[in-house]
Image (cartoon, helix red, strand yellow):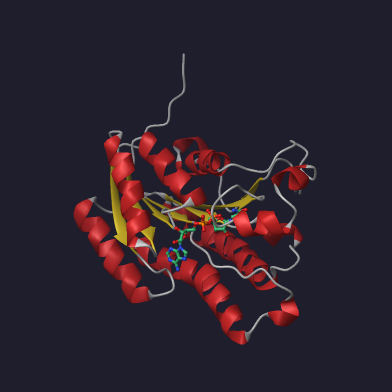
Amino acid sequence: MSISIDLSGQVAVVTGGGSGIGEAIARTLAEAGAAVAIADLSPQAADRVAKEIEAVGGRALGVPMNIADRASIDAALTTVRTELGPVSHLVNNAAAWAVKLFADHTPEEVERVVGVTLNGTMAVTQAALEDITAQQGSIVVIASDGARIGERYMSAYTAAKAGLLGFSKSLAREVGRKGVNVNAIAPGTTNTPGGAGFIEQAGGAEKLAKAYPLGRIGEPQDIANAALFLVSPLSSWITGQVLSVSGGFTMV
Ligand SMILES: NC(=O)c1ccc[n+]([C@@H]2O[C@H](COP(=O)([O-])OP(=O)(O)OC[C@H]3O[C@@H](n4cnc5c(N)ncnc54)[C@H](O)[C@@H]3O)[C@@H](O)[C@H]2O)c1
């Protein structure tokens, strides 16, 4: 006997899929058979990941998308629908951050961090919701353990991510009867190009690992495995939840 996850015939959009956690999620959903749109601010990064997925037999498309720009979102989703079909699953992974004292955040930085991370995620979700509802699909929001317990020097980012937890729960209550589930993943510190600066500032991966009950920081694949579960039929009776994928760092 064996259990397998088969997403063939389904289209998944992964924002920020050109690097780090989003890249691992895109590869993993493609491995499970989904046609994956890698929607990223960097068209080069999106194309690279799409080509690498196709080279190993998967179906993927790189599309330029700035989640902070509704026109860019709509154009990207039109391309996805034409090339791959209607969207079944959306993984909201792209975000922006600033690592500094709260007192040193400029209004423009706060605007950028909240505008991309919170408002951008809501905008992509709104643009894809009709498709996802028609397909009875799922929405996954990549939040952060910092949104649950706080993270010093990342106040605007943490505020935006905490906003996403409220958004996910509210939307889950709204669309559940329509057959759509919405869940959030709260990663702990994860070894990615985007996380490198934070890891360095905190004294390195080995030092950080001491705070983790499971003795290490995260790898992108750790988060991708949880995302796969949350878009799969295995989680069909789970919605409005926040799953910490952080080696036990946060237990709530
Ligand atoms: N790495 C960590 O330690 C960590 C911890 C907790 C949560 N997270 C979250 O995981 C997610 C991925 O982070 P990562 O570490 O893999 O980052 P990363 O920098 O390695 O990758 C982020 C990707 O998002 C893209 N992107 C940035 N702004 C965008 C925009 N406006 N529109 C579309 N794409 C955009 C970038 O081009 C890049 O390809 C983020 O939501 C982050 O907040 C990361």
Q: At which x and y percent is residue 133?
A: 37, 56
- Where's residue 149, x and y in %? 76, 59
Q: Position of residue 156 (x, y in %)?
A: 65, 73
Q: Is residue 149 left or right of residue 67?
A: right
| Residue 10 figure quarter | top left
Query: Residue lying farthest left?
Result: 82
> Relative to 13, is 51 on the left or the right?
left
Which of these two is toward me, 30 or 42? Answer: 42
The residue sitting at 53% across, 56% down in the picture is 141
Identity of the residue drawn at 31% across and 47% down: 50
Q: How many marks?
A: 0
| Residue 46 shows up from this direction | yes
Q: Is residue 238 left or right of residue 4?
A: right
> Which residue is at a point 57% across and 73% down the rendered structure image?
113
Residue nearer the viewer, 154 or 178: 154
Q: Is residue 109 above or below residue 116?
A: below
User: Horizontally, is 103 left or right of 163 in the view?
Assistant: right
In the picture, residue 125 is in which quadrant? bottom left
Instruction: Please provide percent x and percent y for residue 221.
Output: 53, 39
**Residue, far bottom:** 107
* Residue 145 visible: no
Foreground pick, 180 / 222: 222
Q: Residue at x 66, y 50 (%)?
A: 189
Up-down relation of residue 38 to residue 167 (above or below):
above
Foreground pick, 148 / 213? 213
